[in-house]
Image (spheres, helix red, strand yellow):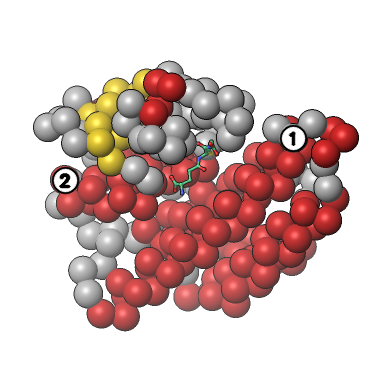
């Protein structure tokens, strides 16, 4: 079995699990309990990943892999998939979309940690606003491209974008990203109903 330090709320873990579902590998993953936190380090996760972040995977031959980008590419190779286009423009577009979605998520997590992990007297609204600016800018780019997106999780860029938009629904429910992104919203309505996305919706 593959062993995965896991959180049902993590959008990066969702990316890994959606990838695994697309490839028919989800049943080969044993989910290991973890409590990732930016300040209260979880020593269990650190046995696979010194950064103590999830996702962190141990392969069947004992290799420790992180972060989500590497794990997803490993799964694609293991499952003889085509979620990482091997060459040409399709490859660079898919990888850059993954970076865009992961960057949106990095900003979302930093904004959330400011409110949940930092003591109230040290919180800084300017920090959160700056992260929200990054999120809005990433959404603008997603909206500009949404007309070209396929309706199914056909590559890692689209999977990552789907997980990022799903995370906004999950943790930023008051932020009406659909009002900014009508085309992406229409795409997401169909995309998120795919079995690989439906099986991996975030939970607290
Ligand atoms: N770039 C990493 C980000 C992983 C990440 O930030 N995971 C969060 C949970 S959603 C985490 O483990 N946070 C704990 C920490 O920041 O130390 C990836 O793509 O896997």
Q: Residue at x 83, y 47 (%)?
A: 124
x and y, in percent, of residue 14 in the image: 45, 40
Judging depth in this view, the residue of 132 and 152 nearest the camera is 132
- Above or below residue 33? Residue 54 is below
SS for callout 1: loop
The answer to which of 144 and 137 lies nearer the viewer is 137
- SS state under label 2: helix
Number of numbered discs on residues: 2
* Relative horizontal placement of residue 119, taking residue 97 as reference (left or right): right
Q: Residue at x 60, y 31 (%)?
A: 39
Q: Nearer the viewer, residue 150 or 169?
A: 169
Image quarter of the C terminus: top right
Which quarter shows the N terminus? top left
Answer with left or right where residue 194 lies relative to residue 179. Answer: left
**Which residue bears the numbered disc 2?**
78
Q: Which residue is mark 1?
A: 118
Give the x, y percent position of residue 8.
50, 29
Going from N to C along the chain, the mark reached first, 1 or 2, is: 2
Q: What residue lies at 34% left-to-right and 61% top-to-bottom?
A: 155
Left or right placement of residue 144 versus residue 192 in this view:
right
Confirm if mark 2 falls within 8 A of ligand 1: no
**Hey, which residue is sitting farthest bottom in the picture?**
89
Give the Cα separation between the discs numbered 1 and 2: 40 Å
Q: Residue at x 82, y 41 (%)?
A: 123
The percent coordinates of residue 133 (x first, y second) are: 74, 64
Q: Rate crowding at label 1 as few (under 14), some (14 to 19) or many (20 or more) other CA atoms within 10 Å.
A: some
Q: Position of residue 28 (x, y in %)?
A: 22, 29
């Amino acid at each position: 079995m593959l062993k995965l330090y896991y959180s049902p709320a993590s959008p990066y873990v969702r990316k890994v699990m959606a990838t695994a579902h697309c490839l028919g590998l989800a049943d080969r993953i044993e989910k290991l309990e973890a409590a990732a936190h930016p300040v209260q380090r979880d020593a269990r996760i650190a046995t696979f990943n010194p950064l103590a972040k999830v996702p962190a995977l141990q392969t069947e031959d004992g290799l420790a892999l992180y972060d989500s980008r590497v794990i997803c590419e490993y799964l694609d190779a293991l499952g003889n998939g085509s979620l990482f286009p091997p060459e040409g423009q399709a490859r660079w577009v898919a990888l850059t979309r993954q970076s865009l979605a992961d960057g949106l998520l990095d900003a979302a997590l930093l904004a959330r940690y400011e409110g949940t992990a930092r003591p109230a007297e040290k919180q800084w609204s300017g920090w959160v606003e700056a992260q929200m600016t990054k999120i809005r800018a990433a959404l603008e780019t997603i909206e500009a491209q949404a007309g070209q997106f396929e309706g199914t999780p056909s590559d890692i860029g689209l999977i990552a974008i789907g997980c990022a938009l799903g995370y906004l629904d999950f943790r930023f429910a008051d932020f009406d990203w659909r009002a900014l992104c009508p085309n992406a919203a229409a795409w997401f309505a169909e995309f998120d109903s795919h079995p690989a996305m439906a099986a991996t919706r975030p939970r607290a």
